Protein backbone atom coordinates (compact mmCIF):
# COMPACT_ATOMS: atom_id res chain seq x y z
CA UNK A 1 0.00 0.00 0.00
CA UNK A 2 1.26 3.46 -0.89
CA UNK A 3 2.09 5.94 1.87
CA UNK A 4 0.03 8.54 -0.01
CA UNK A 5 -3.44 7.55 1.19
CA UNK A 6 -4.88 10.84 2.43
CA UNK A 7 -3.97 13.78 0.18
CA UNK A 8 -4.68 17.47 0.70
CA UNK A 9 -4.65 19.85 -2.28
CA UNK A 10 -4.97 23.58 -1.66
CA UNK A 11 -6.05 26.28 -4.08
CA UNK A 12 -6.47 30.02 -3.69
CA UNK A 13 -8.97 29.93 -6.58
CA UNK A 14 -6.45 31.25 -9.09
CA UNK A 15 -5.98 29.73 -12.54
CA UNK A 16 -2.39 28.88 -11.58
CA UNK A 17 -3.69 26.29 -9.12
CA UNK A 18 -4.89 23.96 -11.87
CA UNK A 19 -1.60 22.08 -12.12
CA UNK A 20 -1.60 21.14 -8.43
CA UNK A 21 -5.20 19.96 -8.66
CA UNK A 22 -4.61 17.89 -11.76
CA UNK A 23 -1.55 16.22 -10.25
CA UNK A 24 -3.37 15.63 -6.96
CA UNK A 25 -6.13 13.84 -8.88
CA UNK A 26 -3.54 11.84 -10.83
CA UNK A 27 -1.73 10.82 -7.66
CA UNK A 28 -4.96 9.89 -5.87
CA UNK A 29 -5.90 7.80 -8.89
CA UNK A 30 -2.58 5.96 -8.92
CA UNK A 31 -2.42 5.19 -5.19
CA UNK A 32 -6.16 4.61 -4.70
CA UNK A 33 -6.16 7.28 -2.01
CA UNK A 34 -8.53 9.91 -0.70
CA UNK A 35 -8.29 13.52 -1.85
CA UNK A 36 -9.47 16.63 -0.02
CA UNK A 37 -9.55 19.91 -1.92
CA UNK A 38 -9.32 22.97 0.30
CA UNK A 39 -10.49 26.08 -1.55
CA UNK A 40 -9.17 29.13 0.28
CA UNK A 41 -10.64 32.58 -0.16
CA UNK A 42 -7.91 35.09 0.55
CA UNK A 43 -8.49 38.76 1.45
CA UNK A 44 -9.76 40.93 -1.41
CA UNK A 45 -9.99 37.94 -3.73
CA UNK A 46 -13.03 37.90 -5.98
CA UNK A 47 -14.32 35.27 -8.33
CA UNK A 48 -13.81 31.53 -8.79
CA UNK A 49 -12.14 29.48 -11.44
CA UNK A 50 -14.46 28.08 -14.13
CA UNK A 51 -12.36 24.96 -14.36
CA UNK A 52 -12.98 24.18 -10.70
CA UNK A 53 -16.71 24.83 -11.04
CA UNK A 54 -16.96 22.52 -14.05
CA UNK A 55 -14.89 19.67 -12.66
CA UNK A 56 -15.69 19.77 -8.96
CA UNK A 57 -18.69 21.87 -7.98
CA UNK A 58 -21.22 20.16 -10.23
CA UNK A 59 -20.53 16.86 -8.43
CA UNK A 60 -21.98 18.16 -5.16
CA UNK A 61 -25.20 16.22 -5.64
CA UNK A 62 -23.13 13.07 -6.16
CA UNK A 63 -20.98 13.64 -3.05
CA UNK A 64 -18.16 15.10 -5.12
CA UNK A 65 -17.32 11.85 -6.93
CA UNK A 66 -15.22 11.95 -10.08
CA UNK A 67 -16.13 9.79 -13.09
CA UNK A 68 -14.22 6.59 -13.59
CA UNK A 69 -10.70 6.76 -15.04
CA UNK A 70 -9.36 4.20 -17.52
CA UNK A 71 -6.52 3.19 -15.21
CA UNK A 72 -8.80 3.15 -12.15
CA UNK A 73 -11.63 0.81 -13.23
CA UNK A 74 -12.80 -0.61 -9.91
CA UNK A 75 -13.30 2.49 -7.77
CA UNK A 76 -14.40 6.07 -8.27
CA UNK A 77 -12.08 8.89 -7.29
CA UNK A 78 -13.82 10.63 -4.41
CA UNK A 79 -12.93 14.24 -3.77
CA UNK A 80 -14.08 16.06 -0.68
CA UNK A 81 -14.28 19.81 -1.23
CA UNK A 82 -13.89 22.25 1.65
CA UNK A 83 -14.15 26.05 1.64
CA UNK A 84 -12.60 28.52 4.05
CA UNK A 85 -11.46 32.11 4.47
CA UNK A 86 -7.95 32.80 5.69
CA UNK A 87 -5.28 35.47 5.73
CA UNK A 88 -2.88 33.15 3.87
CA UNK A 89 -2.64 29.67 2.39
CA UNK A 90 -0.33 28.61 5.21
CA UNK A 91 -2.83 29.70 7.86
CA UNK A 92 -5.60 27.78 6.11
CA UNK A 93 -3.49 24.62 5.86
CA UNK A 94 -2.35 24.77 9.48
CA UNK A 95 -5.97 25.01 10.61
CA UNK A 96 -7.02 22.13 8.36
CA UNK A 97 -4.31 19.69 9.46
CA UNK A 98 -5.23 20.34 13.08
CA UNK A 99 -8.61 18.81 12.29
CA UNK A 100 -7.48 15.80 10.27
CA UNK A 101 -4.38 13.75 9.47
CA UNK A 102 -2.96 13.97 5.96
CA UNK A 103 -0.02 12.22 4.30
CA UNK A 104 0.85 14.82 1.68
CA UNK A 105 0.08 18.44 0.81
CA UNK A 106 -0.03 19.55 -2.84
CA UNK A 107 0.16 23.23 -3.76
CA UNK A 108 1.06 25.29 -6.81
CA UNK A 109 4.79 25.90 -7.34
CA UNK A 110 5.25 29.66 -7.56
CA UNK A 111 8.27 31.65 -8.70
CA UNK A 112 9.04 35.05 -7.21
CA UNK A 113 11.32 37.97 -7.95
CA UNK A 114 14.78 37.33 -6.41
CA UNK A 115 14.60 40.42 -4.20
CA UNK A 116 11.37 39.15 -2.64
CA UNK A 117 13.04 35.88 -1.63
CA UNK A 118 15.91 37.80 -0.04
CA UNK A 119 13.91 40.32 1.98
CA UNK A 120 10.49 38.76 2.53
CA UNK A 121 8.90 35.43 3.35
CA UNK A 122 7.14 33.98 0.31
CA UNK A 123 3.92 31.95 0.53
CA UNK A 124 5.73 28.74 -0.46
CA UNK A 125 8.43 29.18 2.18
CA UNK A 126 5.82 30.04 4.81
CA UNK A 127 4.14 26.72 4.10
CA UNK A 128 7.40 24.86 4.71
CA UNK A 129 8.00 26.69 7.97
CA UNK A 130 4.49 26.34 9.38
CA UNK A 131 3.25 22.99 8.03
CA UNK A 132 4.72 19.76 9.41
CA UNK A 133 3.73 17.75 6.34
CA UNK A 134 5.58 16.64 3.22
CA UNK A 135 4.75 19.30 0.62
CA UNK A 136 4.67 18.74 -3.13
CA UNK A 137 5.04 22.01 -5.04
CA UNK A 138 3.48 21.20 -8.42
CA UNK A 139 4.23 23.10 -11.62
CA UNK A 140 2.52 23.14 -14.99
CA UNK A 141 4.84 20.62 -16.66
CA UNK A 142 3.17 17.16 -16.63
CA UNK A 143 4.94 14.13 -15.23
CA UNK A 144 6.41 11.86 -17.90
CA UNK A 145 6.18 8.08 -17.64
CA UNK A 146 9.94 7.72 -18.22
CA UNK A 147 11.02 10.76 -16.21
CA UNK A 148 13.48 11.14 -13.35
CA UNK A 149 13.11 11.90 -9.66
CA UNK A 150 16.25 13.43 -8.14
CA UNK A 151 16.74 13.04 -4.38
CA UNK A 152 19.14 15.51 -2.78
CA UNK A 153 20.85 13.89 0.22
CA UNK A 154 22.92 15.43 3.01
CA UNK A 155 25.66 12.89 3.73
CA UNK A 156 27.70 13.77 6.80
CA UNK A 157 28.60 12.28 10.18
CA UNK A 158 25.57 13.62 12.04
CA UNK A 159 23.79 10.79 13.85
CA UNK A 160 20.36 11.96 12.68
CA UNK A 161 21.36 12.33 9.03
CA UNK A 162 21.21 8.62 7.99
CA UNK A 163 17.70 8.29 9.45
CA UNK A 164 16.45 11.34 7.60
CA UNK A 165 18.15 10.30 4.37
CA UNK A 166 16.28 7.01 4.50
CA UNK A 167 13.02 8.89 5.07
CA UNK A 168 13.77 10.94 1.96
CA UNK A 169 14.58 7.80 0.00
CA UNK A 170 11.42 6.02 1.10
CA UNK A 171 9.23 8.92 0.02
CA UNK A 172 11.13 9.35 -3.25
CA UNK A 173 11.09 5.61 -3.94
CA UNK A 174 7.33 5.35 -3.42
CA UNK A 175 6.74 8.31 -5.71
CA UNK A 176 9.06 6.92 -8.38
CA UNK A 177 7.27 3.59 -8.27
CA UNK A 178 3.84 5.20 -8.57
CA UNK A 179 4.88 7.40 -11.50
CA UNK A 180 7.10 4.75 -13.16
CA UNK A 181 10.10 7.07 -13.05
CA UNK A 182 13.82 6.57 -12.48
CA UNK A 183 15.17 7.38 -9.04
CA UNK A 184 18.43 9.37 -9.01
CA UNK A 185 20.51 10.37 -5.96
CA UNK A 186 22.60 13.49 -5.45
CA UNK A 187 25.03 14.47 -2.73
CA UNK A 188 26.66 17.90 -2.45
CA UNK A 189 29.85 18.58 -0.53
CA UNK A 190 32.30 21.43 -0.17
CA UNK A 191 36.06 21.08 -0.06
CA UNK A 192 38.29 23.39 1.95
CA UNK A 193 38.40 25.91 -0.86
CA UNK A 194 34.62 25.94 -1.30
CA UNK A 195 34.99 25.07 -4.97
CA UNK A 196 31.93 25.50 -7.14
CA UNK A 197 32.43 22.55 -9.48
CA UNK A 198 33.38 18.94 -8.92
CA UNK A 199 36.77 17.65 -9.96
CA UNK A 200 38.35 14.46 -8.66
CA UNK A 201 41.75 16.19 -8.69
CA UNK A 202 40.68 18.97 -6.33
CA UNK A 203 39.75 16.97 -3.25
CA UNK A 204 40.19 13.24 -3.90
CA UNK A 205 39.84 12.18 -0.25
CA UNK A 206 36.70 14.22 0.35
CA UNK A 207 35.17 13.20 -2.96
CA UNK A 208 35.97 9.53 -2.38
CA UNK A 209 34.47 9.65 1.13
CA UNK A 210 31.16 11.10 -0.10
CA UNK A 211 31.06 8.87 -3.14
CA UNK A 212 31.43 5.73 -1.03
CA UNK A 213 28.64 6.82 1.31
CA UNK A 214 26.43 7.60 -1.66
CA UNK A 215 27.09 4.17 -3.15
CA UNK A 216 26.24 2.49 0.16
CA UNK A 217 22.81 4.09 0.10
CA UNK A 218 22.39 3.24 -3.57
CA UNK A 219 23.22 -0.43 -3.00
CA UNK A 220 20.28 -0.74 -0.61
CA UNK A 221 18.02 0.40 -3.46
CA UNK A 222 19.83 -1.56 -6.19
CA UNK A 223 20.69 1.66 -8.03
CA UNK A 224 23.53 1.66 -10.54
CA UNK A 225 26.27 4.29 -10.63
CA UNK A 226 24.72 6.06 -13.60
CA UNK A 227 21.91 7.18 -11.29
CA UNK A 228 24.28 8.71 -8.74
CA UNK A 229 25.51 12.30 -8.82
CA UNK A 230 28.20 13.97 -6.71
CA UNK A 231 28.73 17.72 -6.79
CA UNK A 232 31.29 19.98 -5.17
CA UNK A 233 29.80 23.36 -4.28
CA UNK A 234 26.91 25.09 -2.58
CA UNK A 235 23.65 23.10 -2.68
CA UNK A 236 21.77 26.13 -4.08
CA UNK A 237 23.73 25.79 -7.31
CA UNK A 238 24.61 22.10 -7.46
CA UNK A 239 21.05 20.82 -6.95
CA UNK A 240 19.57 23.23 -9.50
CA UNK A 241 22.30 22.45 -12.08
CA UNK A 242 21.95 18.68 -11.60
CA UNK A 243 18.16 18.81 -11.85
CA UNK A 244 18.46 20.62 -15.19
CA UNK A 245 21.14 18.24 -16.46
CA UNK A 246 19.04 15.20 -15.51
CA UNK A 247 15.85 16.78 -16.86
CA UNK A 248 14.19 15.88 -13.55
CA UNK A 249 10.43 15.96 -13.16
CA UNK A 250 10.65 16.14 -9.36
CA UNK A 251 13.39 17.03 -6.88
CA UNK A 252 13.06 15.57 -3.37
CA UNK A 253 14.86 17.52 -0.65
CA UNK A 254 14.88 18.25 3.07
CA UNK A 255 13.78 21.55 4.63
CA UNK A 256 14.98 22.63 8.05
CA UNK A 257 12.78 23.96 10.83
CA UNK A 258 15.19 26.82 11.77
CA UNK A 259 16.13 25.71 15.26
CA UNK A 260 19.67 27.16 15.29
CA UNK A 261 22.02 29.27 13.19
CA UNK A 262 23.11 26.29 11.07
CA UNK A 263 19.49 25.42 10.37
CA UNK A 264 18.96 29.03 9.31
CA UNK A 265 21.69 28.63 6.68
CA UNK A 266 20.25 25.36 5.42
CA UNK A 267 16.77 26.84 5.53
CA UNK A 268 17.92 29.68 3.30
CA UNK A 269 19.15 27.04 0.84
CA UNK A 270 15.71 25.42 0.80
CA UNK A 271 14.03 28.77 0.19
CA UNK A 272 16.42 29.62 -2.64
CA UNK A 273 15.84 26.24 -4.29
CA UNK A 274 12.07 26.67 -4.14
CA UNK A 275 12.45 29.66 -6.40
CA UNK A 276 15.30 28.37 -8.61
CA UNK A 277 14.05 24.93 -9.54
CA UNK A 278 11.73 24.86 -12.53
CA UNK A 279 10.56 21.30 -11.90
CA UNK A 280 8.27 20.03 -9.14
CA UNK A 281 9.63 19.83 -5.59
CA UNK A 282 8.78 17.37 -2.82
CA UNK A 283 10.03 18.95 0.42
CA UNK A 284 10.19 17.10 3.72
CA UNK A 285 10.87 18.63 7.12
CA UNK A 286 13.94 17.29 8.88
CA UNK A 287 11.87 16.65 12.00
CA UNK A 288 9.63 14.25 10.08
CA UNK A 289 9.06 11.00 11.96
Image (spheres, rainbow, N blue to C red):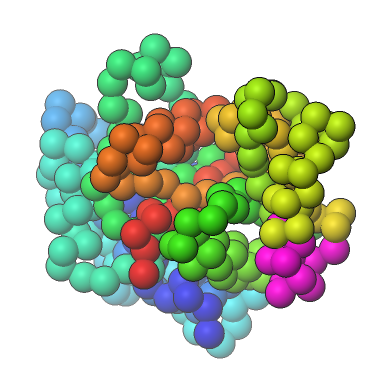
Query: How would you classify the magenta stretch by its main secondary structure?
Result: helix
Residue 20: x and y in percent read 46, 48
Image point 43% across, 38% down: which residue?
266
Asked if 119 appears above or below 11 in the picture, the reply is above
| Residue 219 covered by magenta stretch | yes
Where residue 241 appears, as percent x and y from the top left, is: 70, 31
Q: Is residue 88 visible?
A: yes
Residue 253: where, in percent of width, then height?
52, 49
Residue at 79% of width from left, 66% of height from top? 223
On screen, 214 above or below 141?
A: below
x, y (%) of residue 124? 36, 37
The answer to whether residue 183 shows anywhere in this view is no
Quarter of the view holding residue 225: bottom right
Q: Is residue 252 above or below residue 77?
A: above
Front residue (pair 110, 273): 273
Q: Is residue 203 magenta?
A: no
Q: 42 or 73: which is nearer to us?
A: 42
Q: Quadrant of the C terminus?
A: bottom left
Residue at image position (13%, 44%) is 85
Q: Which residues are magenta?
A: 214-224
84 relative position to 141: left or right: left
Amino acid sequence: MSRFQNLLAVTDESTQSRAALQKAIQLANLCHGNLTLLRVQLPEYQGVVHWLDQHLSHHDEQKNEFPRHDSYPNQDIKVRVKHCRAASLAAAVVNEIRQEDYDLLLVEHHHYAPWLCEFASTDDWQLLKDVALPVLFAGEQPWSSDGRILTALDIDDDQETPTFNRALLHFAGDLAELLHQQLHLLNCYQDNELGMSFSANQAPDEASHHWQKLRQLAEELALTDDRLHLGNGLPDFVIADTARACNSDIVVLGANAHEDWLSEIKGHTSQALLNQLQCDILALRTNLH
